[in-house]
Amino acid sequence: MNKPLPPPELLTVTRALRRLTQALDSQSKQLETLSGMTASQWLCLQALAQSARPLSARELADWVSLTPGTISPVLDRLEIKGWVQRTRSVEDRRRIDLEITDTGRSQWQSAPGVLPTQGVAQFAALGRERRKALAQSLEDLTALLAPIKETTRT
């Protein structure tokens, strides 16, 4: 029995995703070379810099799409560098709050970022509706390609 062929647009999407992955990998390497921080560290600093309040590790992990197990060593390295501060929450003693330090904010602001400056400018020039449509398309594609989590049967 022959396997049905996928829609022809899938090849276009697959090739575009490959090129996107290569571009992001290249930019990430440049970011680390120029600033001494990884893309994950930069994203964490960005989230903390833009947050109106301290975040928990879980909130930060959700915000930057990392697992709690992955974000913990990232936060350890950021804390060692003095770029992030962990403090016990005054509202809930069980919670550890994360905040960007002045040094961390300075490092984040001076780093080139995870996306090329030219690409960010071109994206901004697209107009609000086109940007929203592209963002939604990427969200839709991510949902289609995300691994299905099996539910535990009880």
Image (tube, rainbow, N blue to C red):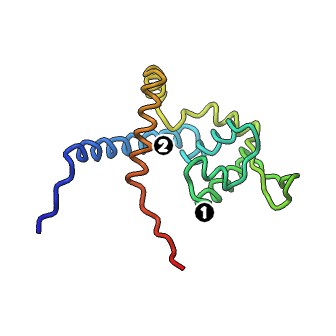
Q: Mark 2: which amino acid? A: Ser
In front: mark 1 or mark 2?
A: 1
Figure quadrant of residue 3: bottom left
* The C terminus - image quarter: bottom right
Residue at disc 1, secondary structure: helix
Give the residue displayed 72% in from the left and 48% down from the top.
55
Q: Is residue 97 left or right of residue 107?
A: right
Crowd rating for badge 2 (residues with CA inside 10 Å; few <14, some 14–19, many 20+): many
Farthest residue, direction bottom: 154
Figure quadrant of residue 137: top left
Give the residue displayed 69% in from the left and 41% down from the top.
48
Q: Is residue 88 left or right of residue 112?
A: right
Residue 65, given in percent of the width and then of the height, sits at 55, 51
Crowd rating for badge 1 (residues with CA inside 10 Å; few <14, some 14–19, many 20+): few
In depth, the one of 64 and 150 nearer the eye is: 150
Residue 54, given in percent of the width and then of the height, sits at 76, 45
Dot 1 or dot 2: first in sequence order is 2
Could you say which disc has been placed on residue 69 in the image? 1
